[in-house]
């Protein structure tokens, strides 16, 4: 009997299949491979390199059984979608007021299964460095992200049209008796469910998440 691959988008729908009307969720701690950078994601070579590194590491771990190198506790799974944390130098929301994308600070990241420990990550980082010497694997890290209480909404459309959706989310947060708690340790968070190379801008699906108190 074939065992179905674990797909976080299906097994934990509340974190990925957001609704176009905002909701409040409690997000548990999850492991991510992360890469930090700065600049406009549309034009920055640094951002492209970060994504190349994230996918190289994530798929090397995912395909490890084919090399007889599966970590302890390995199970077959679907590589999780790309996610991003975004902020400006003054820790303001990057989508309030005038939008200067060159000033973006970001953390690009991909969630990992729980069996990806620090030791597992370091092992596969060395493998990726050997296979792809042009990638600077030292830029990547494994980190646990614990977001806790958040407001969440699905944005459908171009990334440039996000401010209106974000306003809807933040207005809901305030109306529900909470406040937006974006800070140096809690960031504006996006989860990219669509591939912009294959999906028209007006049909892109992006989960937007704001930490709250």
Image (cartoon, grey):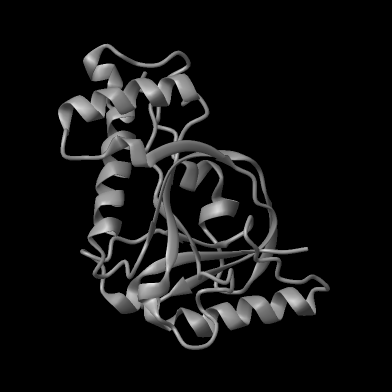
Residue that protrudes farthest toward the right in the picture: 177
Residue 147 coordinates in the image, percent (x, y): 65, 51
At horizontal 25% and vertical 51% (from top left) the residue drawn is 49
Quick check: 102 above or below 5? below
At horizontal 39% and vertical 58% (from top left) the residue drawn is 193
Residue 26 coordinates in the image, percent (x, y): 70, 52
Q: Quadrant of residue 112?
A: top left
Residue 191 coordinates in the image, percent (x, y): 46, 58
Residue that protrudes farthest toward the front in the picture: 89
Residue 75 visible in the picture: no
Quick check: 92 above or below 141? below
Image quadrant in which the C terminus is located: bottom right
Q: Is residue 176 rendered to the left or right of residue 128?
A: right
Q: Quadrant of residue 211?
A: bottom right
Quick check: 85 above or below 92? above
Residue 25 coordinates in the image, percent (x, y): 69, 57
At horizontal 57% and vertical 72% (from top left) the residue drawn is 90
Q: Is residue 193 rendered to the left or right of residue 21?
A: left
Q: Is residue 85 rendered to the left or right of residue 136?
A: right
Image quadrant in which the N terminus is located: top left
Residue 160 visible in the picture: yes
At horizontal 30% and vertical 13% (from top left) the residue drawn is 69
Viewer-nearest residue: 61 or 186: 186
Q: Is residue 101 rendered to the left or right of residue 115?
A: left
What is the total number of numbered labels drawn onto the structure image?
A: 0
Residue that protrudes farthest toward the bottom in the picture: 98
């Amino acid at each position: 009997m074939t065992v179905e691959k674990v797909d976080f988008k299906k097994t934990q729908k509340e974190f990925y299949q957001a609704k176009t009307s905002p909701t409040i969720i409690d997000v548990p701690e999850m492991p991510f491979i992360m890469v930090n950078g700065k600049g406009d994601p549309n034009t920055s070579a640094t951002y492209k390199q970060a994504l190349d590194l994230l996918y190289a590491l994530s798929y090397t771990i995912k395909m490890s059984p084919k090399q007889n190198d599966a970590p302890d506790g390995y199970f077959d799974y679907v590589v999780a979608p790309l996610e991003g944390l975004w902020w400006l130098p003054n820790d303001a929301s990057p989508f309030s007021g005038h939008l200067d994308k060159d000033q973006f600070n970001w953390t690009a990241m991909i969630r990992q299964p729980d069996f990806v420990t620090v030791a597992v990550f370091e092992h596969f980082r060395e493998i990726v460095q050997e296979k792809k010497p042009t990638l600077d694997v030292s830029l990547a890290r494994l980190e646990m992200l614990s977001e806790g209480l958040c407001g969440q909404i699905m944005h459908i459309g171009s990334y440039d049209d996000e401010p209106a959706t974000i306003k809807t989310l933040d207005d809901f947060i305030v109306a529900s008796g909470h406040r937006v708690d974006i800070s140096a340790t809690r960031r504006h968070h996006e989860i990219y469910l669509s591939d912009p190379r294959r999906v028209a801008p007006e049909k892109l699906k992006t989960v937007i998440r704001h930490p709250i108190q």
